[in-house]
Image (tube, grey):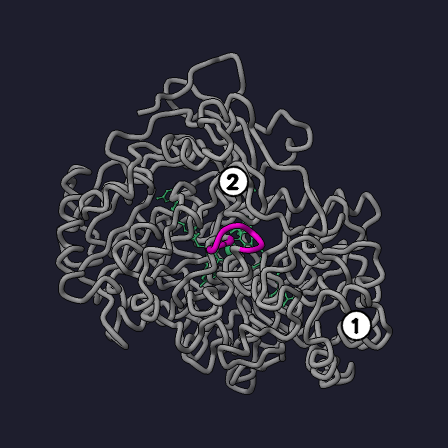
Amino acid sequence: MSTVATSPLRDRHVVCTVCDIGCQLRAEVADGKLTKVLPHENPLLARNICYKGTAAPAIHNHPDRLRVPLKRAGERGQDEWVEISYQQAMDEIAEKLQDIVAKYGAESLAVSTSGWNTQVTHGMDRRFMNLLGSPNWISGVSLCAGNTAAVNKLTYGWFPFPDIMNTKCVVLIGHNPKRHSWTPIFNMINAARANGAKLIVLDPRVSEQAAQADLHLSLRAGTDAAMLFGWLNVIIEEKLYDQDFVRDWTVGWDELCARVAEYPLDRVEQVTGVDRDQIRTAARMYATAKSAVIPWTPITDQQISSTSGIRLQSILRAITGNLDVVGGETLGGFNPDFLPESRVQFHEALSQEQRDKQLGSGDHPAYTYRAQDLLGDVTEKVWGYRYADLVMGCYMANPTAVFRAMADSDPYPVKALFALGNNTLLSYPNQHQIYRALMNQELIVAHEIFMTPTAMLADYVLPGDVFSERNHIADTWSWTNRLTVSEKVVEPSAEASSTFQFWRDLAHRFGFGEHFPWSTLEEVLDFRLSPSGKTFDQFVHDHYMHSPLPEFRKYEKMGFATPSGKVELASSVLAELGFDPLPYHREPPVAPGDDYPYAVFTGVREDSFFQTGQRNIPVLRRRTPRPSLFLHPADAARDGLADGDWARLETPTGSVVAVIAVKDTMKQGHVRVPHGWWYPEMRGSADLAGAFISSDAVLCDDSPQWLDYEQGIPHFKGFPGRVVKLDEPPALSSIALGG
Ligand SMILES: Nc1nc2c(c(=O)[nH]1)N[C@H]1C(S)=C(S)[C@@H](COP(=O)(O)OP(=O)(O)OC[C@H]3O[C@@H](n4cnc5c(=O)[nH]c(N)nc54)[C@H](O)[C@@H]3O)O[C@H]1N2
Ligand SMILES: Nc1nc2c(c(=O)[nH]1)N[C@H]1C(S)=C(S)[C@@H](COP(=O)(O)OP(=O)(O)OC[C@H]3O[C@@H](n4cnc5c(=O)[nH]c(N)nc54)[C@H](O)[C@@H]3O)O[C@H]1N2
Ligand code: SF4
Ligand SMILES: [Mo]
């Protein structure tokens, strides 16, 4: 076992995992406890810290941190437990899983994890599942950068990272980094603007980024694909594209031009609600900038036209000559000194028969094995590995299909769910369906740091470690090739485990020991660093950060990792799978109307929390004691609603309560609902600590007509809803009511 480094002579570097952007910070320790996190000493990194990061000691030392494994004592969901040892818990979990696999097959195990906070899975989850034979791994990344990565690969074989610092134009499609939300990206955008870069923001409301933009296009929610067609129209008509690049490095140009012609600016104006002159100005600003970036956005990850919306961004990046150039979109590749997670995942072990069972791959294959395997040969040729699981998103099952299998055994039973660092119940669409799914399980294991609503539904709850308690090399899940070091500065509780330890110990109980030869996390890190010739200890001594010098236009040597070797404006993979190879705009099946007048969008991240977490951290909760619905003043007046009123937001799928915030920055006809609300302080007084009271997931439909065709993504951006004032405040805690 490694011990905690005690040298007082140098700063201890950690990578914050309170949110998923991974700021590099310094840690201070006293009496075996994390006491402070401080900005990095490198002035270029020092501004990358927010108040969630500085709250890490309050999170890591919280009295409610899970310290001992728990086994369910009452009925599922009753939140009654007995304490057991880690070894006993693992023995029982292994035995039960073996029975389930014997009865229903290996595919009856599903795993849900995001890996953002747990960090140290190192692909071990997939490795175990591949050896066992289950393809049913799902994740919140299916609604975030993971699915974007998979869809980007269809067009040019990789997922680029924007060179914001050197760019001359930044386009934010909803994406709204703030001082306390994705702070490093916020800082980079500010630096680029100080350097003369233009900023274009597409957002229904006047977001913080929109307020400082050179151009803000206030489009109707859910119409991003149509808007991007408008840009393409202008760029093609005015020949603002890189003609040499299009000629030499793309396929499908003529088909694309024909499709773009179906979206003239008057149609785009009508669909998006944005004036055609503004669309034209934006397209010119983007395409004529010396360099430009469209950073990843979750907005097009979460729409009914998701695949098209993401592909249109890829197409714009490519035809304007911004791929793999300074100030453009860098195609980093893997860090040559570090084995990528994809290498550890061992997908080679999963048979074709089991791959074919991956849930959702029949109807919605884009990020499943079925689509991504079509890129295997070319990925190996260009990037050196057959599997490139970028941001964990490229070989996933479809969550909606998995929950259906869990609830109804359709098309086959899924009977065991392991949720690691993931609050599954609240983190996908249609929470009622997820609840039915979880209640129908024979075994649920939650690996957590706090008792969440999902953990309350488990049979076993295993306490996890946190970033101050483990060594790690963060590799941005292969999105970039930058490696950053996170040092263990305190010891975890004796009965806690890392997610690595969990998978390793399970694998040994399943007879997969020869494929899990590592005993400690440090041995895994030594293994992953083996191409560098350094051990983890040497690496930490030499670096707090490491990335190879950037190399540009690598495609001139290697081509693109697509079947044609070029940028596929018309996607051969989509065509082969029976889909439209070109992008299109699609409206949701039901538009806002008489009964449900508002277009509801979920999101606008809370500065005070990461996703469903931290509502139990007083220093953060005080900043945002309760969830709020944003409304435009004219809408509020029409519906008799005032700032501070409690109201119910209803959709045909479900309803939530929250407080009204009247904002003139909101777009008329729209209402914003936040993600991830439950009430940890109501544990014991409300079912599952109030998980159904204010969670956006209860509102969102996941029936087939509401899903994106290619990926099966739900529509979080512009579904119909109505807002009804509550006569009396809801039955909530004093923290929520009095805040
Ligand atoms: N309905 C709905 N669903 C969504 C979204 C939405 O807006 N609406 N957003 C989507 C997006 S963009 C994302 S990125 C995903 C995010 O999904 P997740 O990354 O799963 O996000 P969290 O809700 O923060 O859940 C993380 C859980 O991990 C626990 N945790 C934190 N640190 C550790 C640790 O070190 N070890 C262990 N074992 N556990 C830890 C936390 O207590 C928390 O319960 O959700 C997606 N799902
Ligand atoms: N403090 C904090 N920071 C976070 C997180 C957190 O939970 N807390 N979560 C992190 C994660 S995992 C993610 S994915 C990111 C997400 O963060 P962002 O990318 O900033 O996304 P959101 O905050 O959900 O919404 C951003 C904007 O999208 C606009 N919008 C809504 N619907 C549409 C639409 O249809 N089209 C367009 N163009 N815009 C629309 C909203 O008005 C809002 O201003 O934040 C990350 N940073
Ligand atoms: S933005 Fe804040 S919470 Fe996120 S990694 Fe950085 S310091 Fe941590
Ligand atoms: Mo996300």
Q: Dot 2 lies on which element? A: helix
Q: Tell me: 39 left or right of 355.
A: right
- The dot on residue 279 is 1
Mark sitting earlier along the chain (1/2): 2
Residue type indicated by callout 2: Lys
Q: Tell me: 164 left or right of 15.
A: right
Q: Residue at x 42, y 34 (%)?
A: 525
Binning the other alpha carbons within 10 Å of mark 2 as few (below 14), some (14 to 19) or many (20 upward) gives many
Residue depth check, mark 1 versus mark 2: number of the one nearer the observer: 1
Give how far across and how far down residue 341 sits, in percent: 44, 46
| Visible residue check, residue 707 | yes
- Quadrant position of residue 562: bottom right
Give how far across and how far down residue 207 sits, in percent: 67, 58
Structural distance between the alpha carbons of marks 1 and 2: 37 Å
Magenta run includes residue 205 = no
- The dot on residue 52 is 2
Q: Are marks 1 and 2 in contact (CB under 8 Å)?
A: no
Mark 1 sits near ligand 2, with its Cβ under 8 Å away: no
Quadrant in which the N terminus is drawn: top left
- Quadrant position of residue 225: bottom right
Binning the other alpha carbons within 10 Å of mark 1 as few (below 14), some (14 to 19) or many (20 upward) gives many
Q: How many marks?
A: 2
Q: Main secondary structure of the magenta part?
A: loop
Q: Ligand 2 lies in which image quarter?
A: bottom right
The range drawn in magenta is: 381-390
Q: Residue at x 50, y 26 (%)?
A: 539
Give how far across and how far down residue 619 sits, in percent: 48, 38
Mark 2 sits near ligand 3, with its Cβ under 8 Å away: yes
Give how far across and how far down residue 466 sits, in percent: 39, 36
